[in-house]
Amino acid sequence: MNTWRNASLAVTAAALLTLTTACGQDQGTASPNGQAVGNAAPAQQPAESGYGSAGGGYGSGADKEAAEPKAAGQLAVQDSKKLGKVLTDSEGFTLYRFDKDTANPPKSACEGECATTWPVVAAGNATAAAGTDADLLGEVGRADGTSQLTVDGWPMYRYAKDTAPGQVNGQGIGGTWFAAAPDGKKAAKNADSEGVTEPADPAGLSVRKDPELGDIVVDGRGMTVYRFTKDSAWPMKTACTGDCLKKWPVVAPLAKNAVDGVTTKGFVTFDRPDGVKQQTIDCWPIYTFAGDAKPGDTNGQGVGGTWYAVSPDSELVGASK
């Protein structure tokens, strides 16, 4: 009996060891957002929704259906230190717009689980904020028969993880969600004086279709993301150190809900030996290239026969098998 019990315990211990070494690491700790960090194996996460969330619907427990749309009431304009003028509802909660929607004609691409994470703003009794153009307010019918508020044609949403007035936790999620300015454009610091309509410091990973490489991963600025064939995922190691990092800056750690269309398998933070913290996909460290001057550049592709763009499922793009 004791022999059987000892064997059972040994099997259980072996299974636990396997779970804690999924990225070839020995041990680690969990960060507050549930990601494994340092030398830890990735925590199990819900399936991706494809809309900048990790699934499930934040702030809604296990609910699968979006809540009944809540009207905005008297809109207001709030001054954000980071984003400038931001449009809010009557309770001071930030309103957002989604890049996958269209304004002309108005149409929402956020349905089902997406609308749980990004609650729809009902058209209802919305009133223009003081000093703004009331003619910009409109509405668009949704598939479920409800009417959604639009500003200059863009459907409006709240973010379920904004739990207090004035928060902008949804800014830049997945590279597709942005706080709305009073005119329906993306909120941006000094947008009125400089004509800037893009958000400040968007964070996240998303997918861009390159005419030559196909679907590749880009960061929140639209810069191409790369992997280095001399690195290792199992065990997790880096061969790019010192001067190499000047040419190939690491992608800093990200939250899983800042990812849109990219696998979150092995999505952990790598505590490098040099003290730098780096994001990984499928346990592979990822980088950008200093030689890429603007979004859309892929100048790092194939450099030295060791650097390659990354596909949404973390494969090397264009590398010989």
Image: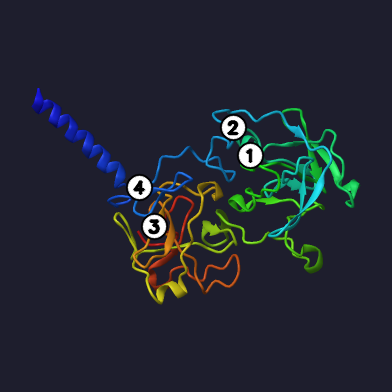
- Spot occupied by residue 71 in the image (x, y as percentages of width and height): 78, 34
Q: Amino acid at mark 4?
A: Ala
C-beta proximity under 8 Å, tags 1 and 2: yes
Give above or below for 91 relative to 240: above
How many residues crowd mark 1 within 10 Å: few (<14), some (14–19), many (20+)? some
Q: Label 3 belongs to which residue?
A: 270
Disc on res. 160: 1
Residue 134 appears left or right of 168: right
Q: Amino acid at mark 3?
A: Phe
Q: Label 4 belongs to which residue?
A: 41
Tag 4 secondary structure: loop
Tag 2 secondary structure: loop
- Spot occupied by residue 89 in the image (x, y as percentages of width and height): 77, 42
Q: Label 2 belongs to which residue?
A: 60
Give above or below for 70 relative to 103: above
Task: Indicate the quadrant containing the C terminus: top left, top right, bottom left or bottom right.
Answer: bottom left
Per the model, the C-alpha gap separating discs 2 and 4 is: 27 Å
Per the model, the C-alpha gap separating discs 3 and 1 is: 29 Å
Q: Amino acid at mark 1?
A: Ala
Q: How is the image coloured?
A: rainbow
- Residue 307 visible in image: yes
Q: Amino acid at mark 2?
A: Ser
How many residues crowd mark 4 within 10 Å: few (<14), some (14–19), many (20+)? many
C-beta proximity under 8 Å, tags 3 and 4: no
